[in-house]
Amino acid sequence: MIRRAVLGPCVVGLSLAVLSACASNPMPAPITRPGGVATRPPLPPRPGQPEPAQPVPSDFALTPVRFSDVPGWGNADAAPALAAFRRQCDVWRNRTPDAPLTGGRYGGPIGNWLPACDAAAAIQPGQERWFFENHFEPSIVTGPGEAKITAYFEPVIQASRSWAPPFTEPLLSRPPDMLTIDLGAFAEAYDNEALRGAPRTLTGQLVNGHLEPYPKREAITPYQGQIIGYAHPADVYNLQVQGSGRVRFADGTESRAQFSAQNGYKWNSALGALRNSGRLQSPTWANFRAWLDQNPGEQKSVLNADPSYVFFQEEAIPDPAAGPKGAAGIPLT
């Protein structure tokens, strides 16, 4: 049984409690299943019959609590959370009020959150905790098994504008010959069920008038002007696994390498491949870097075990506290 406080629908950066907008809704009663599905209790077994197996809970439960019950709330810095919430509000205001918050069963329509968005715009420094206490309702999450909350790691790597050991692997921007095909649009245009069952998008390259799969990592060659900079091969690969990160150059300047495109192939860990071959006992990034340094002639072949390749676009970092853009199109916090 898990019993921990986590952040839910508003995703504003406090790992404390599930928060729900309460501007237009009263405090809900404790629930055992999202959606309030009621079930009839089972009948008792007949004499001589074995006891029926108890059903295993398959969902989590949200139990409303007070903010004073949330561990650490009294000392939490709510300013970053409010800043992230304001950025999210800017996205919501561009959608219709009846649109679902997350596209799923939780969070309700966006319109339920807009009064809290309006109030957030007027909050002054020092009032952040008051804002959340007056516009949100915390709940404790309980349920079977383990629960995981995803976070985002933005690596910072050392780089050079020119090739110079150990900065030998290029960071590449999106190639000019890369095409992205939206199969979903074709499925609707042709009313084709086979296309609806296919991947939403395909990445390819136009060759003699035909669309072909984009080359694997081993066959990618930089175009003129495509190289953003150079870094250690392990750092470039780490950046590609993470999807984006910060690049710190020798003169002290920093840029963001923001995800731009991927060549379409399924990711296959180069660290895992090296471990499976018996050449790397402990597949950590430090050990991977050391192995590449000790075996410079095998760097390319080891990285080529992963056919997936990520391209970046270089961006300025106007706010050092803001991370790269997430799926909602706003900076992560």
Image: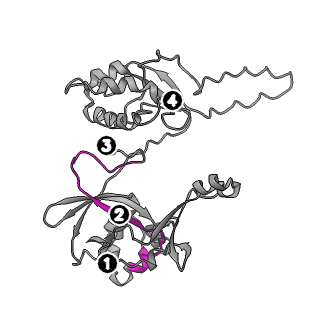
The answer to the question of whether label 2 and label 4 lie on touching residues, with beta carbons closer than 8 A, is no
Hey, which quadrant is residue 166 in on the image?
bottom left
Q: Is residue 42 magenta?
A: no
The Cα atoms of the two marked residues, 1 and 2, are separated by 15 Å
Along the polypeptide, which appears first: circle 1 or circle 2? 1
Q: Which residue is mark 1?
A: 224
Say what secondary structure mark 2 lies in.
strand
Residue range highlighted in magenta = 300-326
Along the polypeptide, which appears first: circle 4 or circle 3? 4
Say what secondary structure mark 4 lies in.
loop
Along the polypeptide, which appears first: circle 2 or circle 4? 4
Mark 4 is surrounded, within 10 Å at the Cα level, by few (under 14), some (14 to 19) or many (20 or more) other residues, namely few
Q: Nearer the viewer, mark 4 or mark 3?
A: 4
Q: Which residue is mark 4?
A: 98
Amino acid type, label 2: Phe
Q: Position of residue 108 (x, y in %)?
A: 51, 28
Residue 238 sits above or below residue 215 on the image: above
Q: Nearer the viewer, mark 1 or mark 2?
A: 1
Q: How is the image coloured?
A: one colour
Say what secondary structure mark 1 lies in.
loop
Q: How many marks?
A: 4
Residue 291: in sight, yes or no?
yes
Residue at (41, 44) in percent of width and height: 328
**Dominant secondary structure, magenta:** loop
Q: Nearer the viewer, mark 2 or mark 4?
A: 4
Q: Which residue is mark 2?
A: 312
Amino acid type, label 1: Gln
The answer to the question of whether label 1 and label 2 lie on touching residues, with beta carbons closer than 8 A, is no
Amino acid type, label 4: Asp
Along the polypeptide, which appears first: circle 2 or circle 3? 2
